[in-house]
Structures are given as C-alpha cells and as structure tokens.
Image (tube, grey):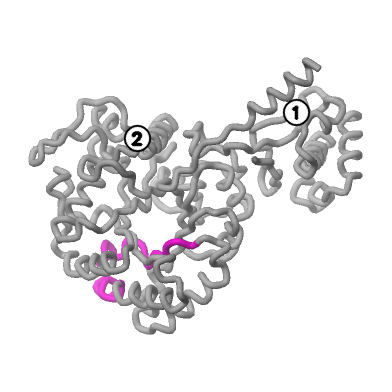
Amino acid sequence: MATFFFFFLSFLIFFHSSSAEPFIGVNYGQVADNLPPPLATAKLLKSTSIEKVRLYGADPAIIKALANTEIGIVIGAANGDIPSLASDPNSAVQWVNSNVLPFYPDSQIILVTVGNEVLTTNDPNLIYQLLPAMQNMQNAINGALLGGKIKVSTVHSMAVLGQSDPPSSGFFRPSYEPALRGLLRFHRDNGSPFAINPYPFFAYQSDPRPETLAFCLFQPNAGRVDWVSGIKYMNMFDAQVDAVHSALSDMGFKDVEIMVAETGWPYRGDSNEVGPTIENAKAYNGNLIAHLKSMVGTPLMPGKSVDTYLFTIYDENLKAGPGSERAFGLYKPDLSMTYDTPSTLKPTATIWYVPKAGISDAQLQSSLDYACGQGINCSPIQPGGACFEPNTVASHAAYAMNLYYQNSAKNPWNCDFSQTATLTSQHPSYNNCIYPGGST
C-alpha cells in the first residue's frame, strides 16, 4: 500500500498547472522544411499557457488543427495580396470566404493582418494601396457579420520611427506620416491595434556593451534616464514600446492600442554575430514573460501588459541571412524545448509512457504484443509507417506502450506492463514519428 501511495504521489507531481496568459502569444513561422504536423503543434500549444498564435499566412491545415483549442489565431494576407484586395472589394470577400468562414468560430480567428512591414518596403504603390486593402478586408468581415469579433491590422518594423531615444520624444519618420495618418484613423475607428516588431536584440547588436546587454535582457543594471521626461527605464523593451506610444501621441492617436507582433532573441548565430547564445535567449524570453505577467506595464502605459507575440515556435531553417535568423525557435521539430523556458511556455500537463531502462527485448516484445492486441492503431510501427525506423523491439514497444496508455484511463498503476514502463515529461517523438501525449 505504501508503494502504491508513493507511486501515486509521484504521478501527481508530473501534473502542474499555471494560469493562462491572455496577453502572451507566439509566432508560427513556416520558412522551413522540417516542421512537425499542424495537429502536433496544436496539441503542444494547448498544453502550455500560450493563448494566442500568429500565422504569417492563412494555412488551412494549421487553422483547422487549432479548432476547439480556444487559442486565439492571427492570420495574414501577404504583401502580394494587397493590390487585388485594394482594387476589388470582391477580392476581400473571396479572401474572407476562403480563409475565415470555413473555420470560424471553431478556430478562434481574432485578427487579420494585411501585409507585413509594408511601409519600410518604400514601395509607393504598395504603401498607397495598404489602407484601401485593409478597409475592404474590414468591410468583408463586417459583411460576414463578424465585425467586432475579428479585427484588421498591419504589422510595422521599428524602422517606421524617426526617433526612439529618448522614449518620451519618439516620433514617426516624416515620410511615413501621410500613410500612417490614414492607418491610425482606421485603427481608432475599428478598435484595432497598431502592430509593431520591437527587437532589443538588434539594439544590442548596434551597441554591444555589457551594460547594454543587461538593459536588453531585463537584468540588473543602472537604468537609463529619459532626459526629457526624467523617467528612468530599466529595460529596452519598455523603452522601445514607449517610444511607439510617444509617436502615436505625437500624431494625436495615443488612444490606439499597441500590439507587439514579434519580439525574441536567437540562441545561436554566426561566429561574427554579437549576442545570440542560449543563455541570452533564455534570459530575454524568461524575463520578458515575467515582466508581462507582473502587469506593471511600461512607464508611459502603467498597469497593463501589451499583447506580445514571441518569435517563434520553431527555427525556420530555410530563412536567408545570418545564422541567427534561423535560430529563434522556442521548440525543436520533435516538440521538445530548445532550451529551458519559462513555465508559460512549458507543456503544463503532458506526459508520455515509455519503457524503463535495462528491460530485456523479451519483456518488451511481450508488452508490445499485448498493447497492439488491445485494439490500438499500431500501423505507424509497421513497415512504411512513420515510426517503423529504427526497426527495433525497444523502439516499437515504446510507441505501442505509450499509445496504449494514452488510450486507457491513464492510471499508471494498472497499465505499467509488469513494472517495465515509466512516466516521462520528455517528449519521445522524433523526425515524423509523433508520440501522442496525455494532458489534463
């Protein structure tokens, strides 16, 4: 009885919960050829405290996979879609009919972004077409009776600012103001956010002093005083977001909400890059999340946290540019964490059931035969299946034993395969072989 109680207590320790964070989301970049299936990613996100995910497009497989997860979804129309969306209202209607209506409300689409960093392309035609495209998109959403439920925005680079230091004197580049004025009226009229991509990482690269690194990573530092307002800033993220707030105020739109569409820190880079390390990535993401969860806000916007989307779920191994561009991923393609992350990002109640070390092939074969004889789907470990390789008893038994456990009542004391199996919180999936995990 004591053994049973100890095992039951150990089992409970695997399960921990944390409150959801409605202002913390994650980006889902797809410039890669090794991403796990959308359903596996949806289950991973559901097992964390992340409440929102941003797509750069409108991949139907991903949107469908996120159905009934209660995760808010941001989808996007590409820069290349803008001319047709701007010139023809029916194009926007067709876009909504194809990318929103087949999935909503099961898939909780909350925002459509039209274009990405359009202003800083400096393409006058595209910039001119951006506002009409957003207006037509909003009208199409309204026509589908989803106005107020799904908003429309576009995403900007920090380069739209003409000045960001000191934060209280932030302003937009004069050349962008004519376009921004119309966009900001749109945001005010529709209650949609001004989306921006602040990256303290790039600020550190341009000023790689130790004190700048501490300031960018939310670590102890002397702070930096805004010489106009007298406010002392203790981190770069607040300074950058407040600079955007000041720029909005400068144009008469301080009531427009700010959304951080992207921010992150790479964990690896080229030898000549300054700053990308696992330690720095862990510090930035961990301290940023702690800062957001504190609800302290920024000096100019106290008492609330801006919606913030971390960049990104997985590395994008096909991205061009320096090595750091391919090393922002929070998770590996096998769904394990790239490095130790804050509890908000950790799967909060997901476990797998695998063989203990040192178990003989004969015992494992017996467990394999038993599990597959109970009606579970063992086709993935048959020839040609995603989990057939490596073709070993140990590998096949691990998959079958876990699948049997996930399809059972999930009581480890009545399906421990004669004490040959154990619970683990380490994701055993590999390549395209996805082990289903249990969560509560």
In this rendering, is residue 317 above or below 271? below
Nearer to me, 28 or 53: 53
Does residue 70 appear left or right of residue 369 in this picture? left
Does residue 171 appear left or right of residue 191 in this picture? left
**Residue 410 in sight from this viewpoint:** yes
Does residue 404 appear left or right of residue 130 in this picture? right
For disc 2, the marked residue is 275
Nearer to me, 392 or 99: 99
In this rendering, is residue 277 above or below 134? above
- The quarter holding residue 161 reads bottom left
Discs 1/2, front:
1
Amino acid type at image mark 1: Thr
- SS assignment at label 1: strand
**Residue 310 in sight from this viewpoint:** no
The residue under the point 83% across, 25% down is 419
Residue 120's x, y, as percent?
26, 61
For disc 1, the marked residue is 422
